[in-house]
Image: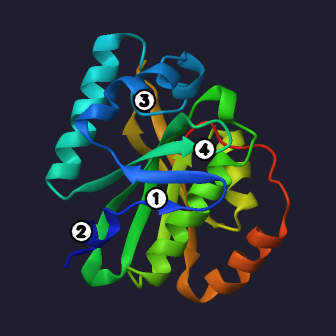
Amino acid sequence: MTWAQIAATPLENDHVLLRPIDPGDREALREPAMDPRIWRYFVQRIETDADFDAFFDAALTDQNAGRRVVHHIIDKSTGRTAGSMSFCNMAEADGRLEIGWSWIGTRFQGKGVNRWSKFLMLEHAFTRLVAERVEFKTDVLNLQARRGLRNIGATEEGTLRSFNPMPGGRRRDAVYYSVLRGEWPRLREQLLLRPKVIHQPESV
């Protein structure tokens, strides 16, 4: 089985449920997505229903093609859709992949949803996919996201200047973070022991 096939499985703990999206998830994800604050540092803007439909359709297309595994995040304390997060840039031959396309609805930010979602995805990456490296990238201006990545123990590696265009004409400097396979057991224990992480990121 390929990484994309292995990654396309539900992930769950006491806090969140992540499962690969399907066409029936469109309206559940639309509701928390229609808040412009989420997309301030994202590579796309979601301002209209048409914007969201294009975003959702692209996610389905990428997933069906094996380019991404897009997870629908459900907050178990409320039973409500909280956002989405993806396995992407899967370089199986090199043993590395990215956790990205991450967004959390504003009502669920700062409540541990981001932390536990990334925990489950890191655990899956290192135990089931046997990845050597998991990477993240975000806008260098997104200080909230950068705090969130430090909170899960990711190491900041550097900034790639003028990485990609952003809505409005600015070119984004992208800052990279990573967790390596040998680091995960220690970080895993720290995340399990820490009762709560504050400063959750808007999007990564």
Tell me residue 109's x, y (percent). Answer: 69, 36
User: Which residue matches tag 2?
Assistant: 5
Dot in front, 1 or 2: 2
Q: Nearer the viewer, residue 201 or 143?
A: 201
User: Which residue matches tag 3?
Assistant: 29
Dot in front, 3 or 1: 3
Q: Secondary structure at mark 4?
A: loop
The CA distance from mark 2 to mark 4 is 32 Å
The kind of residue tagged 2 is: Gln
User: Which residue matches tag 1?
Assistant: 99
User: Which residue matches tag 4?
Assistant: 140
Of the image marks 2 and 4, the number of the one nearer the N terminus: 2
The kind of residue tagged 3 is: Leu
Q: Nearer the viewer, residue 161 or 48?
A: 48
The CA distance from mark 3 to mark 4 is 27 Å
Of the image marks 3 and 4, the number of the one nearer the N terminus: 3
* Above or below for 190 versus 52: below
The CA distance from mark 3 to mark 1 is 19 Å
Q: Residue 55 occupies which quadrant of the picture?
A: top left
Q: Secondary structure at mark 1?
A: strand
Point 28% across, 33% down: residue: 24
The kind of residue tagged 1 is: Ile
Of the image marks 3 and 2, the number of the one nearer the N terminus: 2
* Above or below for 25 versus 101: above
